[in-house]
Amino acid sequence: MKWDKDSINALLLREPKAAERALLVLLERQTFDEVQAHDTKYQNGIGFTGADAEFMTSLALRVKQGLPLTPKQLASVTKTNDKGYCRLAKYHGQLIEEIEKKAKRKQLELEV
């Protein structure tokens, strides 16, 4: 499957587990000190934006502990804008990068 912003958005809106997984993927892209501070310290285009860092980090850490998002939390991260894109879809580029990395690793495992 070829991923793009629309397909990522559709998945995030359809599957609560995909939204939770996206939070974890983005958390992993944050630096250690950013995670500890629940903030964005570097303008590197990786992880959460400054506007989302505090809230999204707290949600991601909740998921990392094995707790699902509450309906209200899920609604917040999947709330759509006037173009129909959810809040997490703005990170589609990073999510696609991680999907492609995972696919390459699987392919390499199959070749070995």
Image (cartoon, rainbow, N blue to C red):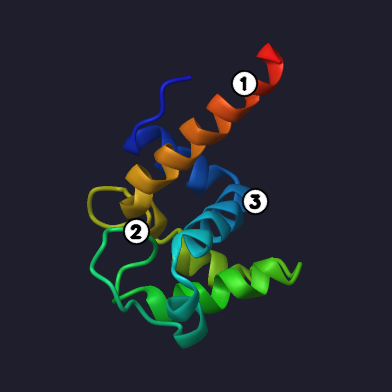
Q: Are marks 3 and 2 in contact (CB under 8 Å)?
A: no
- The kind of residue on which mark 1 rests is Leu
**Number of numbered discs:** 3
- Label 3: which secondary element: helix
Residue 25: x percent and y percent? Answer: 53, 54
Gap in angstroms between the C-alphas marked 3 and 1: 26 Å
- The kind of residue on which mark 2 rests is Ile
Dot 3 or dot 1, earlier in sequence: 3
Q: Tell me, for residue 108, which label it has, or none.
A: 1
Mark 3 or 1, closer to the camera = 1
Residue 69: x percent and y percent? Answer: 64, 68
Dot 2 or dot 1, earlier in sequence: 2
Write down the quadrant of residue 30 in the picture. Answer: bottom left
Residue 10: x percent and y percent? Answer: 45, 39
- Label 1: which secondary element: helix
- Label 2: which secondary element: loop
Report which residue position mark 2 lands on: 46
Residue 82: x percent and y percent? Answer: 23, 55
Report which residue position mark 3 lands on: 17
Q: Tell me which residue sits at (41%, 21%) in the image.
A: 2
- The kind of residue on which mark 3 rests is Lys
Q: Tell me which residue sits at (60%, 57%) in the image.
A: 20
Dot 3 or dot 2, earlier in sequence: 3
